[in-house]
Image: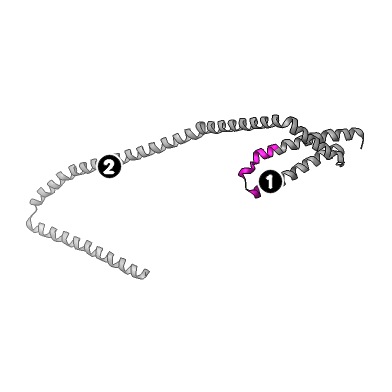
Amino acid sequence: MSLTTQFLTMLTMIGMGSYLGAALDTYGRFLQRQKRAHWVVFINDILFWVIQALIVFYVLLSVNEGELRFYIFLALLCGYAAYQSLFRVVYLKMLEFLIQTSLMIYRFVVKTCYYVIVRPFQFMLQLLLTLLMVGGRMLFVMADMLYKLIKIILRMIFIPIKWFFRLLWRFVPANWRVNVEKFFQKFAGVIAKGKNMKSIIQKWWGKLQK
């Protein structure tokens, strides 16, 4: 491995050490260990360090084809120490600023969508339901009024007819009246027999079903 490659590897590993420090702070900020169960923290820690190891190895593979030297670990340690002493405070402030800004944008977008999309939709739905209820009530009232009006009209029509037939009945001869009365009595008897037969058939059908 040439001196140029070794120098680039040294600088890259210092940068990766600083990256690991920033990644560790970022991971801790989002994980919030105090609010998580121990097994969740344990699994996340393992996944975090496996991913970071793979990233460091990929960078090392790109720089010097993956050759490990003792100074590589020293360079990582120096980069981490440089981050802790020089950049950590600034990075944490920037990270917190970005998080709060992202939260503000997210809340703004959510509220905007709520007041622009959800609230108008709710208002239109409530208005539609109100119109349907009012329309249904009006139709019911109109149907009731129409029924009462038809009932009154029918009464007005049938009362003169009833009076006419009563007047006409008085002029019917007595023997005709007797025959007509007998006919209607027989007709009523037939209807009564039909009702009895219907009840008998229903009882018989019910017994068959059992």
39, 124: nearer the viewer: 39
Which quadrant of the structure image shows residue 94? top right
Left or right: residue 61 compared with residue 29: right
Left or right: residue 5 compared with residue 104: right
Establish if 168 lies above or below 3.
below
Question: The C terminus lies in which quarter of the figure?
Answer: bottom left
What residue sits 53% from the left and 31% below the top? 112
Question: What x and y, as percent, mark residue 120?
Answer: 47, 33
First in sequence: mark 2 or mark 1? 1
What residue sits 7% from the left and 57% below the top? 174
Q: Which colour scheme is used?
A: one colour
Q: Magenta part mainly helix, strand or loop?
A: helix
Question: What x and y, as percent, mark residue 90?
Answer: 70, 29
Which quadrant of the structure image shows residue 88? top right
Other-residue count near label 2 (Cα within 10 Å), few / some / many at <14 / 14–19 / ≥20: few
Give the residue furthest to the right: 2
Q: Give the range drawn in magenta.
A: 25-45
133, 56: nearer the viewer: 56
Q: Which residue corresponds to mark 2?
A: 144
Q: Which residue corresponds to mark 1?
A: 44
44, 136: nearer the viewer: 44
Total marks in image:
2
**Amino acid on which disc 1 is placed:** Asn
**Amino acid on which disc 2 is placed:** Asp
Question: What x and y, as percent, mark residue 166?
Answer: 11, 49
Secondary structure type for disc 2: helix
Which quadrant of the structure image shows residue 15? top right
